[in-house]
Image (cartoon, rainbow, N blue to C red):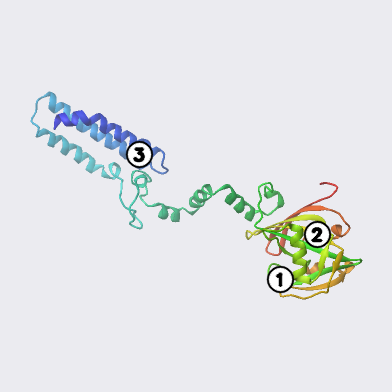
Amino acid sequence: MIKFISDNFTWSLIIILLVNMSQRKLRHSDKKRLATILIAFLFLLFYIGNIVISINNLSPWFLLVDLLIVFLIGFIFRAKVWPYRLHCQKCGKKLDYNHIIGYDDNICSACYDEAHPEEAQKKAEAKLTKEEKIQIESSKAEKVEDINWDYWEPTDRCVITYVEDEDKLLLIEKKQGLGKGYINAPGGHIEIEETAMEAAIRETKEETGLDISSLDYRGVLHFNFKDGLKEIGYVYFASTFSGELKECEEARPFWISKAEIPYDNMWEDDRLWLPQALKGHKFEAYFIFDGKTMLDHKITWDEEL
């Protein structure tokens, strides 16, 4: 027995050292790191007693005395020597290896996150992909400059088409969907298999009954909504058309004088770029919206592009 202890003392200390090194990588594990040092000290104390017994050729029964002394010291300081638990102190769930040797509070990850919501949020954000982080950052944006638009990816691509007839403009009253009740221009989603211009022609036909051609591209709109919607809209103008106006489930089309455009019943951004776009100016625009309220904007005109 004495020889067995002597032969395996070094390996035992190495194992304790490796456990202590593992604990260094775990947060809030100071008490358990101290415990491994105390365990190593008690083991060393037992080893010294073992050597004394061996040198003096004492009876192996003295090993029990040595062991009893070490055990008694450990029992007296048990709160510091053995802070380890196998199960979560809150929910009773079995702990994994890291939580057994580390994390002084002896609770599982779920219970810890519940008790420390701010740290849980930081951990969750650290695991997010680059795209997910951009999504979160854009939903928190209050100003255009808060977003890195080089990495911004729209969740929806659409077109907006203004049909002109001399001093009149074709608009629609939106009857459903985003912007319900607002006055806007014909438009909608770009399907996977079509170009933006093809979508503009199709959507105008569906919402107004008119066939349009000779479209002129005027600009692009970037809409970032705080609810997570990120929409890019390509703006077209057309003055060549045929057919008769027809109302559909989504929109009620009507002609109106350009001097009487009802900006008060349109999206807030329209009044910022539509007047200049009607004059033929090309532009690129960025908007931050919280619901139907515009928080910030930036518009760059053709002479700056």
Q: Which residue is mark 2?
A: 236
Q: Which residue is mark 3?
A: 33
Q: Amino acid at mark 1?
A: Lys
- Residue at the spot 26% in from the left edge and 31% down from the top edge: 11
> In the rendered view, does 202 fall on the left or right side of 281?
left
Task: Determine the image quadrant of residue 5.
Answer: top left
Q: Amino acid at mark 3?
A: Arg
Q: Position of residue 98 (x, y in %)?
A: 37, 45
Q: Position of residue 1 (x, y in %)?
A: 13, 32
Q: Is residue 249 above or below residue 228?
A: below
Crowd band around label 1 with a 10 angstrom C-alpha radius: few (<14), some (14–19), many (20+): few
Q: Mark 2 vs mark 1: which is more N-terminal?
A: 1
Q: Give the spatial CA distance, label 2 vs label 1.
A: 21 Å
| Label pair 2/3, CB-CB below 8 angstroms | no
In the image, which disc is placed on residue 189? none
Disc number lying in front (2 or 3): 2
Q: Regarding mark 2 in the picture, which secondary structure is present there?
A: strand
Q: Nearer the viewer, residue 227 or 63?
A: 227
Q: Mark 2 vs mark 3: which is more N-terminal?
A: 3
Q: Regarding mark 3 in the picture, which secondary structure is present there?
A: helix
Q: Amino acid at mark 2?
A: Tyr
Disc number lying in front (2 or 1): 2
In the image, which disc is placed on residue 180? 1
Q: Nearer the viewer, residue 124 or 257?
A: 257
